[in-house]
Image: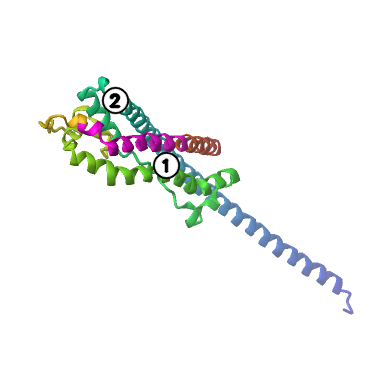
Amino acid sequence: MSKNKTTKYFKYAIGEIVLVVLGILIALQINNWNEDRKERAQEQELLLQLQSEFQSNLEQLDQKTAMRDQMTDAALTLLHNIDHPETRDADSITKHIGLTAVNPTFDPIINDINSSGRIQLLQNIDLKERLARWTSEVIQVTEEEQAWVFIRGNEYLPMLSQKGFMRNVLNRYWKDNVLAAFHLDEGTKTEIDLGNSKKENVISSILDDPLFESSIAQCATYAKLTNSQAVSLRHRIVEILEIIKQELK
């Protein structure tokens, strides 16, 4: 102190502190930059995964929607045959009954990004909100499907079996390759000839059955309602895919 070195010492000490703080700040910034770079890479990976999954969901939804459109048209044709016996044709009726007896349920890929916390990797708030609502929106479609699943399994198919008509329906499935839509791998081909039932008047006994008429009316109703929900769900998927596409750019 006698040599007036105090001021120089404090200046040196402050300079050292400043350098240390700057070094820490620079290290933290580099670390944050590295972490952000890793997260952005993980986000891109997640976006590509979501893009693939929702594209698959879209394709499946379109396929099931087309099948339900066929169900609706077939059911309306059968109701016309019920009301107008003079229009009945055994081969046509067998085909249309077969189209109403299918069960095209939508089984989408449900990503676990919400429960796993990976959704926080996404920067787009709109996309995060849409993904958070995805499961509940799928339920709106599947609820209508399950109503027909119950009627089909507990009333419709048992009645067709009791009437001895399931053989004709299944044989028509194989002839028209309807079952191809249910193969795990596209293009898989399986053939079998079951032949038709030799029982007489089976067509009239089915069409004149009140339970058949009720089942067919419910088939058309639930297929139409489900497809109405599916239209909205399709819009959601297309919008999500468009956001993902922009984010990937």
Residue 11's image quarter? bottom right
Residue 188's image quarter? top left
**In this figure, which residue is indicated by the disc labeled 2?**
81
Residue 53: numbered disc: 1
Question: Taking 22 as reference, is 161 left or right?
Answer: left
Question: Taking 37 as reference, is 23 left or right?
Answer: right
Nearest the eye: 69 or 43: 69
The quadrant in which the N terminus is found is: bottom right
- Amino acid type, mark 1: Glu
- Amino acid type, mark 2: Asn
- Residue 200, x across and y down, in percent: 12, 30
Q: Which residue is drawn at 71% across and 60% down?
A: 22
Question: Taking 65 as reference, is 158 left or right?
Answer: left
Q: How many labels does the image show?
A: 2
Residue 161's image quarter? top left
Q: What's the CA distance linking mark 1 and mark 2?
A: 42 Å
Q: Residue at x 24, y 34 (%)?
A: 179
Asked if residue 172 can be seen in this view, the reply is no
Q: Is residue 69 magenta?
A: no
Q: Which residue lies furthest to the left in this view?
A: 198
Dominant secondary-structure state across the stretch colored magenta: helix
The quadrant in which the C terminus is found is: top right
- Residue 34, x across and y down, in percent: 57, 53
Q: What stretch is highlighted in magenta?
A: 205-229
Residue 124: numbered disc: none
- Crowding at label 2, few (<14), some or many (≥20) Cα neighbours within 10 Å? some
